[in-house]
Amino acid sequence: MTSNTLREVIKQVDTMTLSEQLELIAYIAEKARQTPPTPKPKHKWREIRGLVKEAALGEDAQAWVSRTRMAADSYRD
């Protein structure tokens, strides 16, 4: 819908009675309920594997995992 069309619809809504506006709201709500949601694209891990190099993280992945686990363990103790 273009901006001009939307403005025209808004002008028409402004001239409607309360009951007509409520009927329009009910119609729009029902139409929205019937419209299936757009599915989010699913990404596969294989598609993103290796995109970030170790240099970008500044340390080896295993070292990072070990360090964060030790920090979490010390926080719990």
Image (tube, rainbow, N blue to C red):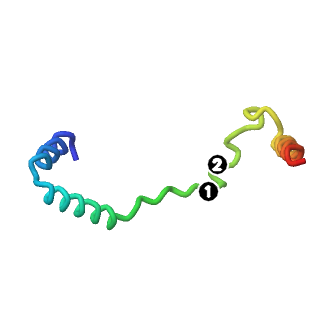
Q: Position of residue 60 (x, y in %)?
A: 83, 39
Frontmost residue, 31 versus 64:
31
| Quadrant assignment, res 46 | bottom right
How many numbered marks are there? 2
Q: Residue at x 15, y 55 (%)?
A: 18
User: Callout 1: helix, strand or loop?
Assistant: loop
- Mark 1 highlights which residue? 44
| Amino acid at circle 2 | Ile
In the displayed structure, would residue 76 be above or below residue 19?
above
Q: Residue furthest front?
A: 18
In the displayed structure, would residue 23 be above or below residue 63?
below
Frontmost residue, 9 versus 75:
75
In the displayed structure, would residue 34 be above or below residue 4?
below
Dots 1, 2 in contact, CB < 8 A:
yes
- Mark 2 highlights which residue? 48
75 lies left or right of 38? right
Q: Residue at x 69, y 49 (%)?
A: 49
| Amino acid at circle 1 | Lys
User: Callout 2: helix, strand or loop?
Assistant: helix
